Amino acid sequence: MTTGAETTAGRSAEQSAEQRVLERIERARLRKPRVREERVTLAHGAGGKATQTLVEAVFVDAFRNPHLEAMTDGATLTLDGTRTVFTTDTFVVSPLFFPGGDIGDLAVNGTVNDLAVCGARPMYLSAGFVLEEGFPVADLRRIAASMAAAASAAGVSIVTGDTKVVQRGKADGCYVNTAGIGVLERDVALGAAAVRAGDAVLVSGPIGEHGVTIMLARGELDIEADLASDTAPLREPVAALLDAVPGGVRVLRDATRGGVATVLNEIAQAVRLGVVLDEAAVPVAPVVTGACELLGIDPLYVACEGRFVAVVDGEHADAALAALRGHPLGEGAAIVGHVAAEPPGAVLLKTSFGGTRVVDMLVGDPLPRIC
Amino acid sequence: MRFVDEYRDADQARALAAQITALCEPGRRYKFMEVCGGHTHTIYKHGLEDHLPESVELVHGPGCPVCVIPMGRVDDAIAIARHPDVIMTSFGDMMRVPGGGGSFFDAKAEGADIRMVYSPLDALKIARLNPDRRVVFMAIGFETTAPSTAMTVLRAAAEGVENFSVFCNHVTILPAIKAILDSPDLRLDGFLGPGHVSTVIGCRPYGFIPGRYGKPLVCAGFEPLDILQSVHMLLRQLADGRAEVENQYTRVVPWDGNPKALEVIGEVMELRPYFEWRGLGFISQSALRVRDAYAVHDAERVFDVPGVRVADPKACQCGEVLKGVIKPWECKVFGTACTPETPIGTCMVSSEGACAAYYNFGRFTRDRVKEATRA
Amino acid sequence: MCLGIPGEVVELSPDRDDIATVEVVGVRRAVNIGLLAPDGAKPGDWVLVHVGFAMSKIDEAEAAATLDLLRGLGRAYADELEALADSDIT
């Protein structure tokens, strides 16, 4: 038998040994990211940790400048006295046509939304196409028509473009790049840096519908569901929010690749604050829940193309929610959590079951699993 | 979702947690192993440990089929996948698991045709649609998954789909549990039995665990209330001085298992004399291979498999972690040579492995989490 | 290991006796029910789905019994709390 004093001493020695290991891990975590792989893998394109590492280690390292290093959805530039936002996005979705949309409206809405969540009014877009030899012109017309419709719905014009054709087998039908510029009409400075403990976290609608739709539309899983992509232009609900709580909105992010979980992790890491989510409050359509349970994936990581995350001053949370719900594209909005001092740089989920778990960033795409 | 939501009720959980606490002997610590990775997943996903008193610790066991695959088998599968006429098919789980020379994802990036499937039947379908290619299914999993592979092989044989084969890595859970029980420094008080394996093998085969080793086992379902109830049943057995096999998951697990599933496994597969488990070493009669009668569908015979062996590094102490003898941070290579980006041992491979979970979340002590979620 | 999800059999395949359509909250997939032989399954049955195969039928009576047991444990706890509260007052 050990005495009480010995046990206590033993335990504290053990605790400090454990503490040393934890500190070593923390130091490793803060080290500059290195790309270990010799070749690019699909994980590097999934929007999670692997993408972050590749972008920081290769592109930010090479292009280094203050605009880029802010790592926002778009760069805010002052051009001849006018505050403008400039952004670009490339679309390689497969299949090209899916329930609720196609690569065309996705390409327009994606860039429009990147501008919108920077607080800008989207104005002009460019469109670049990489086409595979043999691609049906009828499909291209269809894509162009839906781009035109999406542009008109979002109040933007596609004013310049480019077309390249590559040999059969060198691309998957059609890839689209869009770039866009918008004007900052309001005097807002949105950015993760403005986030404070006590702020409220909102999402503008049910999550995961686009990502699950695409997964099912590929047909490989042989799963059917009545589900459509949520692709939509977010300028109007964003404007409604900014008008309703001027000065109360800290940061907006559209929850595309990597989903809501990735966006919130990026915000938490940027300000070294914690985000605490309430699982029961996160809106998820039952059919998305069903598909996610069947495939063993977490809807928090699934892409949306017409939803955004808003962090607002906690005191204005209800007004922000009301403003969002007042717009058809925000009627499913919800307050899903808050910002806290602890745990710095991480996202915690209070589960419906009454427990807690850490919602980490994924390395790559969420993969269907069997175990 | 029916049969799901009702087993995720927070109020029931709190009530059950109080009952669990009441059953714990003051001053005693309890260690239960959840054998199955699915249970580990449930425990993390729902934050189940927050409901348990500190004196009850859950130890994550060896039942994660991708974690226990030795690196050499991954290398062998990649060698097969590199044949230009091969389409390798795999569950999503396997894609990121590293062998000695990279993962399926890495091999895919280098040009191998590796596709994800939801079911082995989908792999067979790919074989039917690509008669000029050889389609291989990377078969992994315990007794739950083996019948599906066996049924698919039977189907391929019946339809004469000769370009379809399976690279069989199916393992059986009982020898692994036995290996853990035989460890001289074992510190476990009981087991949460693998519910879905038990749909196939039933509850009877666990009899030796209380019989020979005196440890109780409760066959547990996969919703969080199932697990809490199973912990309660284990504590009740200990309080009563009993050690038995009990079935909590009666809505899914028949006491005698699924005879048809056992029959198809027996028809298509046979026990290997021994098989290597990552972290646990060679365990005799712990894995399945395809029988001679179905040789044409056995990738190990269709292809010249190199039979790569990558020894677990000596410093890796996954075995001890799995047995609950040491904590992850006490391992010599933890956090230095062995990290989630460069995993050495089985416990670091899957994000739910004990070491990976500790690496990522160890800094969030219960007190800090409570502080953060109070508001 | 072994993700298994409960789903309801909504339709049997007209062409093959080992295939059924199973629905999980609005999500449908063809599932092989060959492992449920010889009893098979019929529309309205709930089954546990794993990698495209029905592994077992869900026993509704047993499910109800488990829930009753859980509720019983919960009630015992609630009664205890109540008793405790009463004893505090007096």
Image (spheres, coloured by chain):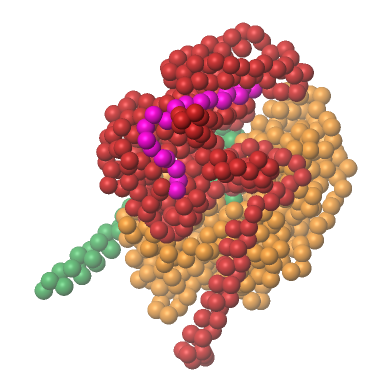
Work out which residue is located at the far front of the displayed protein and give it: A80
Q: Which chain is orange?
A: B
Work out which residue is located at the far left of the displayed protein and give it: C90
Q: Residue at x 67, y 38 (%)?
A: A42
Where's residue B333, x and y in %? 69, 67
Tally the marks: 0
**Where the N terminus of chain B falls, by quadrant?**
top left
Residue B51, quarter of the rendered image:
bottom left
| B72 or A160: nearer the viewer | A160
In the rendered image, is residue A217 in sight?
no
Image position of A333 (left or right of A160): left
Rendered view: B169 above or below B188:
above
Where's residue B182, x and y in %? 67, 71
Rendered view: A139 above or below B160:
above
Q: Residue at x 61, y 12 (%)?
A: A140
Residue A127, quarter of the rendered image:
top right
| B226 or A283: nearer the viewer | A283
Rendered view: A23 above or below B307:
below
The residue stretch that appears in magenta:
A173-193
**Where the C terminus of chain B falls, by quadrant?**
bottom left
Residue A129, quarter of the rendered image:
top right
Magenta run includes residue B312: no
Q: Colour of chain A?
A: red
Q: Residue at x 35, y 49 (%)?
A: A199
In the rendered image, is residue A236 in sight?
yes
| B209 or A164: nearer the viewer | A164
Q: Colour of chain C?
A: green
